Image (tube, rainbow, N blue to C red):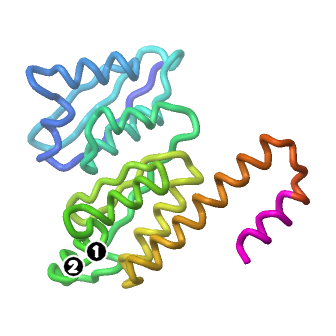
């Protein structure tokens, strides 16, 4: 069973899909098991495969979408791993039609010298790309939700310190859950222990 999927990406990201002398395109074709055709003028990328066996057309499509949202092909490739999610947040929902507001919100998400983006990435183990009017997130599905909440909070005007604290608490809780589960703690006892740690 063959498949064909077309993905539209910004024209200025076409070069990232093709790479120097077509090297990135060849790398992606090998990794994803698909043939890639690129229309540089329209920003259209067509993914084709004669056999759906050994390929995941949805993951391949998401990899191209992620490159279109500013990720390097190497980072976008994470989407081929099972359990990895992609979320794209449109900042216009927070900035309205104002270009100045959009730029200010982008600045809040990136932070001074990239600090805010770096902290979110470190505390959630996700990758973030702030590109144009969007913020794209790649990572484990549960971690993507945390990173998404953090980005949306910053876009809504929350203080950086509060957002960082929320992420830090969530990371500590995840670590404790892993530790207790490794010790063989029952779910009921685990919840009690976590509640004590929070107070």
Residue 1: tell me if it is visible.
Answer: no
Residue at x 32%, y 71% (from the top left corner): 91
Residue 69 belongs to the span the image colors magenta? no
Q: Position of residue 109 (x, y in %)?
A: 31, 69
**Mark pair 1, 2: CA separation:** 6 Å
**Where does the image place residue 134, in percent across and percent down from the top left?**
29, 63
Q: Residue 61 versus residue 147: which sits nearer the camera?
A: 147
Above or below, comparing residue 181 to residue 131 in the picture: above
Q: Are marks 1 and 2 in contact (CB under 8 Å)?
A: yes
Q: Main secondary structure of the magenta part?
A: helix
Magenta residues, as a range? 190-199
Instruction: Rate crowding at label 1 as few (under 14), some (14 to 19) or many (20 or more) other CA atoms within 10 Å.
Output: many
Q: Secondary structure at mark 2?
A: helix
State whether residue 57 is above or below residue 169.
above
Q: Quadrant of the C terminus?
A: bottom right
For residue 24, side relative to residue 33 (left or right):
left
Dividing the picture into quadrants, the one containing residue 197 is bottom right
Q: At which x and y percent is residue 150? A: 45, 69
Q: Residue 158 at x, y = what percent?
A: 41, 83
Q: Which mark is residue 108?
A: 1
The residue tagged 2 is 104
Viewer-proximal residue, 111 or 92? 111
């Amino acid at each position: 069973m063959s498949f064909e999927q077309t993905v539209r990406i910004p024209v200025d990201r076409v070069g990232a899909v093709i790479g120097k002398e077509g090297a990135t395109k060849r790398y992606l074709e090998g990794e994803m098991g698909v043939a890639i055709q690129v229309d540089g003028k329209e920003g259209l990328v067509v993914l084709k495969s004669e056999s759906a066996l050994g390929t995941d057309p949805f993951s391949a499509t998401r990899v191209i979408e992620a490159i279109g949202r500013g990720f390097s092909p190497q980072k976008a490739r994470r989407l081929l791993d099972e359990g990895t999610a992609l979320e794209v947040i449109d900042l216009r929902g927070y900035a309205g039609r104002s270009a100045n507001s959009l730029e200010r919100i982008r600045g809040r998400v990136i932070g001074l010298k990239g600090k805010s983006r770096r902290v979110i990435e470190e505390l959630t183990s996700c990758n973030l790309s702030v590109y144009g009017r969007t913020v794209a997130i790649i990572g484990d599905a549960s971690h993507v939700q945390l990173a998404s909440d953090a980005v949306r909070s910053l876009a809504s005007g929350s203080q950086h310190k509060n957002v960082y604290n929320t992420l830090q608490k969530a990371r500590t809780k995840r670590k404790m859950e892993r530790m207790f589960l490794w010790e063989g703690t029952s779910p009921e006892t685990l919840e009690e222990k976590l509640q004590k740690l929070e107070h």
